[in-house]
Image (cartoon, helix red, strand yellow):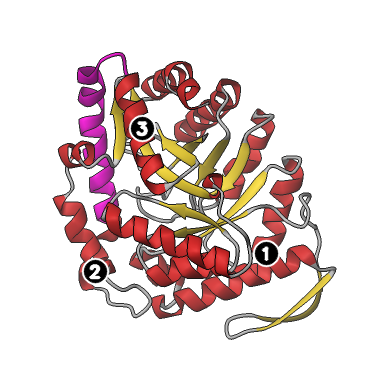
């Protein structure tokens, strides 16, 4: 089992300044490297407290590369809809070089209507821009010169510098949420799978992951290994369950509130590329800390509690790479550091 540190900003200046947030997250990343974590992952989002402190994950990962020696550095994810593919490919390759070949490139379609509106990108172009962008990045990484005549970008005979350090290219992850076709597309193209089991019904998510495995196999890529399926999980460990719940109850509510603020525009948004996303605000309004615990959508409690929750969920989904959100909501840097140390000491060895 591979465990990663998942950095998902859900804070604004009212809770923590950007300078303090980055400093504390870099300290936690350095600690993760020393404690034996496998990876660090950070998102790309804009404008809202939900992810808005990370408009470019590559800036953070470049700094993290200088503070670590082992950690794999994962974009979770970059958003091709908002970037020119030549620029994105070159920047990803730069971080791969800076880190000595430790980059893993995660891509996602983006799903916050306010982000699309601000950038002037129609949501109905999301899937097309994603597919074109990822293919163009891979073309840049594997050729000496590249050309594209697509619906969104056109260029001809462009030199592909810098090349990636890893050959043929860094591992590729694709984030999927709820659409079965997205899971099938990911498997057919041989990408690794990144999922967030926070809101989707577990039975439905398992069916979609099985679709991914079947498509991966039928496309001739072999069998999916557990470490090719990555899940994001809020995780907090404390000496007692009471202490863990007391710390995480307000922290989880803060995360839900911030998520809802960014997603609430789905109340008035419709897009053919995002079936059922109009239900997202309703699902968030119904989510509570008690439901999160009861439905095992987070691992919070004593070392035994956390071990059992992670074991049950990862065995159910066949997942071998878990990235852990320790520093969420109102949890302080000191509390996050303490939970990481306790997790590494009393939970991680039981899996490895």
Indicate the quadrant where residue 293 lies. Answer: top left
Comparing 279 with 345, the one in front is 345
Give the answer, above or below, for where 40 lies relative to 344: below
3D distance between C-alphas at marks 2 and 1: 32 Å
Q: Residue at x 40, y 41 (%)?
A: 314
* Closer to the eye: label 3 or 2: 3
Q: Position of residue 4 (x, y in %)?
A: 51, 36
3D distance between C-alphas at marks 3 and 2: 28 Å
Q: Secondary structure at mark 3?
A: strand
The residue where tag 3 is placed is 235
Q: Secondary structure at mark 1?
A: helix
Q: Residue 87 shows which numbered tag?
A: 1
3D distance between C-alphas at marks 3 and 1: 35 Å
Label 3: few (<14), some (14–19) or many (≥20) C-alpha neighbours in 10 Å: many
Tell me if label 2 and label 1 are in contact, CB under 8 Å.
no
Magenta highlight on residue 226 = no
Q: Position of residue 185 (x, y in %)?
A: 51, 70
Magenta highlight on residue 246 = yes
Q: Main secondary structure of the magenta part?
A: helix
The residue where tag 2 is placed is 278
Q: Secondary structure at mark 2?
A: helix
Q: Which residues are magenta?
A: 238-261
Would residue 296 appear left or right of 69 to someone viewing this image? left
Give the answer, above or below, for where 249 lies relative to 197: above
Label 1: few (<14), some (14–19) or many (≥20) C-alpha neighbours in 10 Å: few
The first of marks 3 and 1 along the sequence is 1
Would residue 301 appear left or right of 96 to someone viewing this image? left
* Closer to the eye: label 2 or 1: 2
Give the answer, above or below, for where 79 lies relative to 22: below
């Amino acid at each position: 089992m591979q465990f990663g540190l998942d950095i998902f900003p859900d804070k604004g200046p009212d809770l923590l300044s950007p300078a303090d947030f980055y400093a504390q997250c870099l300290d936690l990343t350095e600690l993760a490297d020393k404690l034996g974590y496998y990876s660090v992952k950070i998102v790309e989002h804009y404008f809202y407290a939900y992810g808005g402190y990370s408009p470019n994950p590559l800036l953070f990962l470049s700094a993290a590369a200088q503070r670590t020696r082992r950690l794999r550095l994962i974009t979770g994810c970059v958003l091709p809809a908002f970037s020119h593919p030549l620029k994105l490919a070159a920047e990803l390759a730069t971080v791969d070089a800076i880190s000595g070949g430790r980059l893993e490139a995660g891509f996602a379609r983006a799903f916050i209507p306010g982000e699309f509106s601000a950038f002037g990108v129609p949501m109905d172009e999301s899937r097309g821009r994603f597919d074109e962008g990822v293919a163009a990045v891979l073309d840049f990484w594997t050729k000496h010169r590249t050309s594209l005549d697509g619906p969104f970008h056109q260029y001809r005979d462009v030199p592909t510098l810098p090349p990636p350090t890893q050959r043929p290219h860094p591992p590729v992850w694709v984030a999927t949420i709820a659409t079965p076709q997205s899971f099938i597309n990911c498997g057919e193209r041989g990408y690794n799978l990144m999922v967030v089991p926070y809101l989707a019904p577990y039975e439905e998510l398992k069916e979609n992951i099985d679709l991914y495995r079947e498509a991966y196999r039928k496309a001739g890529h072999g069998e999916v290994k557990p470490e090719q399926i990555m899940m994001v999980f809020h995780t907090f460990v404390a000496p007692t369950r009471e202490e863990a719940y007391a710390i995480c109850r307000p922290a989880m509510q803060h995360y839900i509130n911030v998520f809802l603020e960014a997603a609430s525009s789905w109340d008035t948004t419709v897009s053919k590329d995002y079936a059922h996303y109009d239900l997202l605000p309703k699902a968030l309004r119904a989510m509570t800390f008690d439901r999160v615990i009861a439905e095992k959508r987070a691992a919070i409690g004593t070392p035994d509690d956390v071990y059992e929750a992670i074991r049950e969920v990862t065995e159910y989904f066949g997942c071998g790479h878990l990235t852990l959100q320790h520093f969420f909501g109102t949890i302080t840097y000191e509390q996050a550091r303490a939970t990481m140390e306790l997790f590494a000491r009393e939970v991680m060895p039981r899996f490895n």
